[in-house]
Image (cartoon, coloured by chain):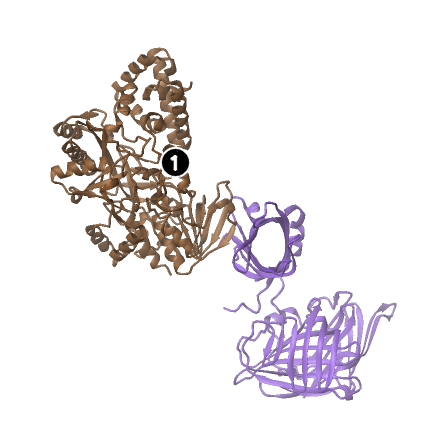
Chain colours: A purple, B brown
Amino acid sequence: MAPSTRARRTTFDEVMEGAFRLAGEDRDRPMRLDLSIDLPGVLRPWSDTEGALTGHVRVPGWADDHSAAGRLRVAPLTARRIRYTMDFTGRDGRRLHLDGWKSIDPRRPVRSMTTLPVTVTGEDGTVAGEGLLRFDLRRDLARFIAGARFPGPDPMRSRWRGQAGRLEVWYTTLTDPVTGTGFWLHHELLAPAGGEARSHGWATVFPPGERPVLARFGPYGWDRPEAGFLAGPVAHVGDRLTGTAGTIAWSLRETGGGEPVHTFPRWAWESELLPAAQIVPRPSAVYDGVVRFGDRVLELDGAPGASARIYGHGNARRWAWLHADLGGGDVCEIVAAVSTRPGLNRLPPLPLVRLRVDGEDLATGDPLLAARRLKADIGLPAWTVRGRIGDRALLVEVTQHPEETVAVDYADPDGAPAVCHNSERADVRIVLARRAGRGWETEREWRLDGTGHAEVGLR
Amino acid sequence: MNAMTGAVATLLGIEDAADLARVAAGAEAIADSLPAPARLGLRTGAGTLDVLARLTTGHALDGLDAAGRDAFCARVAARPSTARMAEMMKIPLLLAAGTELLPAPPPPHGLARPDPELDCAPAAEWPGCTTADAVVIGSGAGGAMAARTLARRGMSVVVLEEGRRFTSRDFRGRPPLDRFLGLYRDGGATFALGRPPVLLPEGRAVGGTTVVNSGTCYRTPEHVLRRWAEAGAPVEGFGDRLDEVEATLRVAPQPMGQLGRNGLLALAGAERLGWRAAPLRRNAPGCVGSAQCAVGCPHNAKYGVHLNALPQACEAGARIVTEATAERILVERGTATGVRARRPDGTFLEILAPRIVVAAGTTRTPLLLRRSGLGGHPELGRGMAVHPATNLAGRFAEPVVSWSGVMQSVGIEELHADGILIEATATPPGMSSFPLPGLGRSLRRELAGADRLAVLGAMIADAPSGRVHGARHRALIRYDLAREDAARLRRALVAMGRVLFAAGAEEVLTGLARKPAVRDEAELTRAAAMAAPADLHLAAFHPTGTAKLGADRARTPVDPAGRLRGVRGVHVADASVLPSCPGVNPQLTIMAMALAIADGIG
């Protein structure tokens, strides 16, 4: 059974130290495991769950591998066992396998929960050594508990569960800081109202001062990959983005990203109650790699950008979107949209704004409630969002130069068309003001000159 | 001098101070290897005798002179209660006296075969966390066959053995008593409680009891197989499996050359009576007749599984962990996932495996299953059959030297249809287990004339009236001799006496306290008829049937394929699965049954 897309996970770090004796030696060496653990579901005492384990194995003079990886099974009551298995590389380049488990003894719960005997074997199964590790309660318990997290499910994992009439998007935008070139990758899963689901998308390069270069890929079938997007030669799985579309080919590695930005309320993303919702799982990521378009090559080294996701019943009736990287992990994310639903389609655009400044997200609270105090004026080549955000006033002005904007035809699951005008070369001005006496005083102002990522969708 | 030394000096009539010191030290060594209750019993017995001596003579035992001790012995023998206590103490003390009072074994010959390669690792050197395809608990007759079968199928197999590995070196350089104490659980003093209490010796070594059995190999009788087939046991093709086991063990009739006088006299006696008798079929190719089967063959001639099935299993990749006591089978949601075993230093090792084969022995298997929370079946541990056995010695005019020759040499099957099997069974040199009559100096005289004794043993097919209690590590075994079995044992005594008299015995020592010696058959018949069950000196061998296999869910804890009911992944493949008493020495039967069960493990 596939894990629910709604389930939370449990992540924590664990440090275990002890003695290790190599086969054939008569002295102990110190051993230390620094492990990061990611388990599906919220860990409970009666859980029986298995998840990924990564970390650092250190036995001085014998092994020092930062990229050890393996599995952890936690079943303290059902199987009375917490089992660690992982593979790592010894100093001499030998691949080694560690296997060990805590055997939970109800009469000695603390001791048995903190003692881990391990056996390390070579690839041929011969025992390379044996260790006895302990979790130091006095030193590490507080850190262990404080470090435990229960994040939601992997937001990059597809949410589609086979329903008809759904649209799911993985998109990435970035700007090359050296040349100012923008790059847009749009991966889409379309489950039409009738017929087979298909995946397709496009890539667009925005060289400064030139017409954007767009190339489409797909359609391909959809094999419900375990993680991310995978269709034909195109993939966005884990930290890798690769693919070819027409004359464009890319191979990128994504690092960092920060905490997800919930442009739409978290509940809307998780419950799927709204017609559609967007989140930005990696709002301030960095990209390295190569993009080839035509006979040109774009070498990326630390290009800032973001990966975002959309899931819902289709595109909005009208919408505007902005992703502005403000530097230092700060971002401004805006989605202003008019619903296609009868009744709602008569309302003005609803601007959902998230402004992350110095690690704090404004507006605090539910973005949908905050949207009541904001107003969007959608148009081309310029559009604005203004209003109040908490006790501050906000003004966002976006200009998409027509020569650096690409128009892409969209199709909803029901077949209705839309046109998206997108530019990764937008100019953006963001002003945050606070009250001073009877007027307003500018608190912060950002200007992005051709590095804003924006689009306007019209029908 | 303490009470034990005094008891040794008095009951065995030892006067030489150096002899006394050595025997007393031996007695202390035996006491130390006994389980706590037996140790307490032995020490209490010695203390009681000392107190009695102080009360009746005014002196401690060690303060009496030789005549005073004789008088004291006479007083002890005169009262049934004290006589019984002295008789109980005599057996361990006689064992302790060993080579001080009896001739030592001659220096060993060359080896019949070298010690084989065995992939053995002591538990102390075995990693705490390992995995395998199958874990076999116990390396005896059943476990060895299961391990070999699974390993040959390409599985990674780990065999857990509570005892240690003994090689021919251990058997060649040490006196029989030392070997005896090391090779048997509880120093050989495992008792089944009941009236009378029954001695139930069990081997504890790599190879299990096959290291210390007499090597007698009987095929499972046809009538037993028919009965088992009705119970649903997998006995189809059992003959082929017995053939395979016989080939593994190289079973052959014992050649007459090494039989020894003890066996020859049994043959002669049976022939004069017109009874069916023959040298036994044994798994001892190259036996030179040193009569030391019960304490480990110093020539590697007795071909136990430690010399064949286990090396073959290791050749196929199996590994043996010695000195590892299985603590419990690990179970998750009704499926076995591994075994937790205790090392001698009290730490634990765990082996995860999806297949667990329990072959811990008839008295241990129920305990292990209960410790593991798998002992829920009401019939587990109940209905244990043993072969209750007793023995009889005939005194001949000429030396017999029973400890020279094959230990168990000749089978007399005349009464086998009635469940009585007589086997000429001697005791290893330097050991005495036959309850020689008398106390003090009269016992010494008996010992001095022990070379003129021929010894026969008889075992009977009993009603399954034993039960193994306990859920921890110590089995509490209860065995109540059924009334008809007591009658059968009396009949066996008389039958053995007839053989001995027919062979020319001057008198027969009965082991019965009321009539220790008889001079003719009529006297023996009377003495046997007079003997209460509690007076019989009983040992029991071949315990079987504590986790019976069969089709009836309610009555058998193990299904016909050897799977323990109520859990997935646990098979039982030792003597405990036998549906009833096999009526013969069960080595071949256990191995063939284990073979059948192991063949069915997926």
Task: Give how far across and how far down residue B260 sits, in percent.
Answer: 24, 37
In the displayed structure, B219 sits above or below B270; it is below
Task: Give how far across and how far down residue B592 sits, in percent.
Answer: 29, 53
Element at badge 1?
helix
* Amino acid type assigned to the residue bearing label 1 in the image: Arg
- For mark 1, name the chain: B
- The residue that disc 1 covers is B179
- Viewer-closest of A352 and A80: A80
Is residue B588 visible to us here?
A: yes
Question: Outermost residue toward the top?
Answer: B58
Task: Give how far across and how far down residue A248 sits, in percent.
Answer: 68, 84
Residue A241's image quarter? bottom right
Residue B241's image quarter? bottom left
- Viewer-closest of B409 and B29: B409
Quadrant (top left, top right, bottom left, bottom right) of the C terminus of chain B: bottom left
In the displayed structure, A148 sits above or below B494; it is below
Asked whether, in this view, residue B485 is left or right of residue A459, the answer is left
In the rendered picture of this protein, how many numbered marks are placed on residues? 1
Task: Give how far across and how far down residue B81 sits, in percent.
Answer: 28, 22
Question: Outermost residue toward the front?
Answer: B110
Asked whether, in this view, residue A5 is left or right of residue B483, the answer is right
- Viewer-closest of A366 and B33: B33
**In percent of the image, x 76 and y 73: which residue is there?**
A325
In the displayed structure, A274 sits above or below A98; it is below
Quadrant (top left, top right, bottom left, bottom right) of the N terminus of chain B: top left
- Viewer-closest of B25 and B334: B25
How many residues crowd mark 1 within 10 Å: few (<14), some (14–19), many (20+)?
some
